[in-house]
Image: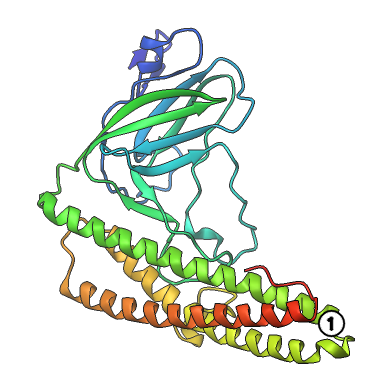
Amino acid sequence: MLGTNGRSIWILDDLTPLRTFKKGTQLFSVQPAIRWRYHEEIHEDKEAGKNPPQGAIINYHLEGKAKGDLTMLILDAKGKLIQKLSSKKAEEVKEDDPDAGDGYKKTVLTNEAGVNRVIWDLRFAGAKIIPGAKNDGGIPQRGPFVLPGNYTIILNVDGKMLTGTVQVLMDPRVKEPIKNLEDSLRMTLKVRDDISRISEMVIRLKKIRSQLQSRDDMLKDNAKAKPLVKQAKALITKIDVLEGKLHNPKAEVTYDILAQGVRLYSKITSLYEWLKDSDGPITQGMREVYADYTKEIAQLATEYQAVLGDLTRLNEAARMLEIPNIIE
């Protein structure tokens, strides 16, 4: 805290950059970060105080503006990648998107000359999502909290690797045994990976369908290719049915899911949100629900492989007619 004769007061949250500054590019030491769970500010008054950033405050100095993209890796004690941050800008959400207010923004590194700051939210990387898909269960692209412990920071600046560490401390209000937290994290990460798996299937199905539709349009006047076009249309129908089981492709806003019936993507995203939003033990109900979802994923994965098998046979037929294949 710093005061002046003019009765002004400055409160600085971290003097480390001032105390340890040296010429050249550097990564400053990071103060321990507490695994708090913050909620929205109670007061709407613009002059009211705000909570400090949620997570670890990481400061770094760049001698000059970086020529390429910056990357920052967060690793656990075993060297396993937890999170990767980049200076690449995230795609902006359109203002007229009905679901634009979910509050999630990708953390982006700044790469200007001088002291820069980024906040690591103490979370793992989130799930891969289906672009444009709606769900009524939260924010799957946000990962769960890491466990208390020491983590390594690696900042890559134009090929120069700067290394630091950060200690993550447990919220002192949480009295849950670490074993329960570890058990919960394992399950949460499994659910996260399942969401990514579902997303990858849908993304691939969409690409295949798009190629099939484009090729069918080009072959509409090719009498020789009529049998191939017929098979392709049958496969497109099969893809439509499977995609409709994986998520709600016709949903334009979140509330459409309620009218159309909740699909696997939205259901498992809800479970994911419940798991990562608590420091308590996993309930028996959660385990039973996840067991059901696991069976559903396995069944739909079998149908997905059947679609790929049909595509392989369709590509073989296309080669016989010297027609370009569909890229899987």
Left or right side of 22 for 152:
left
**On screen, residue 224 above or below 191:** below
- The foreground one among 59 and 194 is 194
Can the viewer see residue 110? yes
Q: Is residue 89 left or right of residue 11?
A: right
Q: Quadrant of residue 30?
A: top left
Q: Quadrant of residue 88?
A: top right
Pick the residue in front: 130 or 320: 320
- Residue 49 can be seen, yes or no: no
Q: Which residue is drawn at the image coordinates 80% and 91% (left, top)?
A: 226
Farthest residue, direction front: 320
Percent position of residue 311, x then y: 62, 79
| Camera-side residue of 194 and 249 | 194
> Circle 1: is it few (<14), some (14-19), or many (20+) Cα within 10 Å?
some
As drawn, 147 above or below 206: above
Quarter holding the C terminus?
bottom right
Q: SS of the residue at dot 1?
A: loop
Task: Name the spot of residue 32 as percent of width and height, x first.
Answer: 26, 30
Q: Residue 119: x and y, percent?
A: 41, 36
Indicate how the structure is coloured in the image. Answer: rainbow
312 left or right, relative to 146: right
Up/down of 10 relative to 326, above or below? above
Viewport quadrant of the N terminus: top left
| Residue at the spot 40% in from the left edge and 12% down from the top edge | 18
Q: Residue at x 12, y 53 (%)?
A: 179
Question: Is 327 on the left or on the right of 74, as rendered?
Answer: right
Q: Quadrant of residue 68?
A: top right
Q: Residue at x 32, y 76 (%)?
A: 294
Identify which amino acid the numbered label 1 is placed on: Leu
Residue that badge 1 annotates:
219
